[in-house]
């Protein structure tokens, strides 16, 4: 059983369009993020997560994003095991229907 929930790209996009403030964390590597990310997303590469986890607040809900959903799933599992409130965006940026910023 997964310790975290998944959220669809469509739901994230709709919530952003409604003006909802979401805490999105992009766990892709630098060169992937340079190609475009969800506007306002915080960049925290999966490879840096154990050393930078203190940048995240356990009282905040986060949505984790990667290219396809695999790395955000791994990051979500690790964070959930460590007491963080996270959801992984299923399908990742490959299925992202919304705006991107570079």
Image: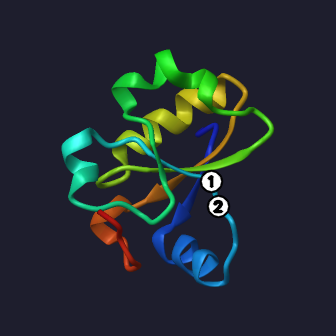
Extreme residue toward the front, this view? 102
Residues packed near mark 2 inside 10 Å, few (<14), some (14 to 19) or many (20 plus):
some
Give the residue pinned by disc 2. 22
Q: Are marks 2 and 1 in contact (CB under 8 Å)?
A: yes
- Tell me how far mark 2 sits from mark 1, CA to CA: 4 Å
13 and 2: which is toward the camera: 13
Vertical order, 14 against 26 (above or below) = below
92 and 22: which is toward the camera: 22
Q: Name which residue lies at 67% across and 79% down.
A: 19
**Res. 76 image quadrant:** top right
**Res. 77 image quadrant:** top right
**Res. 31 image quadrant:** top left
Task: Please state, as top left, top right, bottom left or bottom right, where the C terminus lies in the image.
Answer: bottom left
> Where does the image place residue 94, in percent across and percent down from the top left?
27, 65
Give the residue pinned by disc 1. 23
Q: Name which residue lies at 57% across and 24% down.
A: 53
């Amino acid at each position: 059983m997964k310790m975290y929930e998944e959220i669809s790209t469509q739901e994230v996009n709709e919530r952003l369009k409604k003006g909802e403030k979401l805490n999105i964390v992009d766990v892709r590597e630098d060169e992937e993020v340079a190609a475009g990310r969800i506007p306002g997303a915080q960049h925290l590469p999966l490879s840096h997560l154990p050393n930078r986890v203190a940048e995240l607040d356990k009282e905040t809900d986060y949505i984790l994003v990667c290219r396809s959903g695999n790395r955000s799933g791994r990051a979500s599992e690790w964070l959930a095991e460590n007491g963080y409130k996270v959801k992984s965006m299923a399908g990742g940026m490959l299925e992202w229907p919304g705006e991107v910023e570079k």
